[in-house]
Amino acid sequence: MKEITLLVTIALFSGLALADHHEERGPFYAFYHFAAPDPGAVVAAMDKFWASDCGKQYPADAGLQQEVFNGGYASTHFIINTFQNAADQQKAAEILNTCPSAIEFLGDMTAAGVEPVSQYLGMAPIDENDWGQDSVFTKYDIIVEPQNQAAFAAAFAKMTKALSKNTDIRSYGLGGIGYGQDKFTHWAWFGARSVVEMDHINAQISGHPAVAEFYKTVGSLRTLVNSSLIQNVKNYPRN
């Protein structure tokens, strides 16, 4: 739906996410993937909006991430918003739909040639060691059928608990998508402070016996759709 701009997509999706969630639930992670021919212009647009009066009221921690290697995906970047509850999602939708600074942001993103690709929102029941302290991530997009999800999550938790004891893994987690499951149902990640450290961590993970056991357990429970290397460009903390 190329005629739908990134900002309208964010606004509509933020409002939709409120429908089936109670206010006390959260946090919610909202991903907005897009292709950006001029990444510098995207940073400038985001800087401008988050420095505005409306941007200072925006009820989410946001981060701009570059998809350094992502297979055949059309997106080059994504924005991840962390909403603490559904009320924050609703407030974000109101700001994006009514604030003059948000309309300017829309124009700036359009002028930068941004093309929306996909969006999804979910929660991460496994979310360890504050991924905001890391700047490079290995991200896995996974399909897990409903009847297998509890067993898959249990296997992932068992594996990462073992990895935490004798490897250098930092942040990691497993998230499930509530809205936007057209390509995959879950995402998993491991974080690092640099590409070099990420390579070191990946080498430790791949050779660990707990990972071999995990693969044996979940072999028929999931389909790996894609793996990608993500690098943080800039964070926009909630005021």
Image (tube, rainbow, N blue to C red):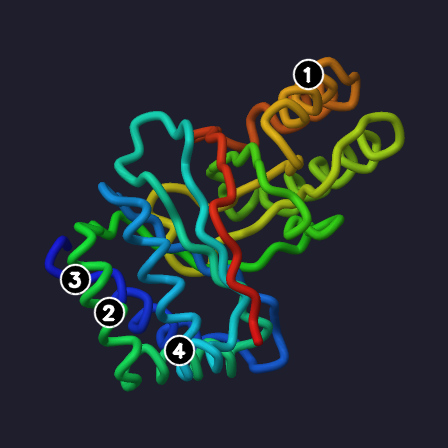
Q: Residue at x 82, y 26 (%)?
A: 167
Circle 2 crowding by C-alpha within 10 Å: few under 14, some 14–19, many from 20: some
Residue on which disc 1 sits: 203
Check disc 1 and report its element: helix, strand or loop.
Answer: helix
Residue sitting nearer the eye, 113 or 226: 113
Check disc 2 and report its element: helix, strand or loop.
Answer: helix
Q: Residue at x 63, y 80 (%)?
A: 24
Q: Is residue 219 above or below residue 111?
A: above
Residue on which disc 3 sits: 4
Q: Is residue 18 above or below residue 220?
A: below
Residue type highlighted by circle 1: Ala
Q: Residue at x 74, y 38 (%)?
A: 170
Residue on which disc 4 sits: 52
Residue type highlighted by circle 4: Ser
Residue type highlighted by circle 3: Ile
Q: Which numbered disc, 1 or 4, marks the residue that appears first in the sequence?
A: 4
Circle 3 crowding by C-alpha within 10 Å: few under 14, some 14–19, many from 20: few
Q: Which numbered disc, 2 or 1, marks the residue that appears first in the sequence?
A: 2
Whole-angstrom CA distance, mark 3 to mark 2, is 6 Å
Circle 4 crowding by C-alpha within 10 Å: few under 14, some 14–19, many from 20: some
Mark 4–mark 2 CB contact (< 8 Å): no
Whole-angstrom CA distance, mark 3 to mark 1, is 41 Å
Q: Which numbered disc, 3 or 4, marks the residue that appears first in the sequence?
A: 3
Whole-angstrom CA distance, mark 3 to mark 4, is 24 Å
Mark 2–mark 1 CB contact (< 8 Å): no
Residue type highlighted by circle 2: Val
Residue on which disc 2 sits: 8
The location of residue 168, given as percent across then percent down, is 79, 29
Residue sitting nearer the eye, 157 or 47: 47
Mark 3–mark 2 CB contact (< 8 Å): yes
Taking the view exactly as shown, the residue that stands out farthest to the top is: 207
Q: Quadrant of the C terminus?
A: bottom right
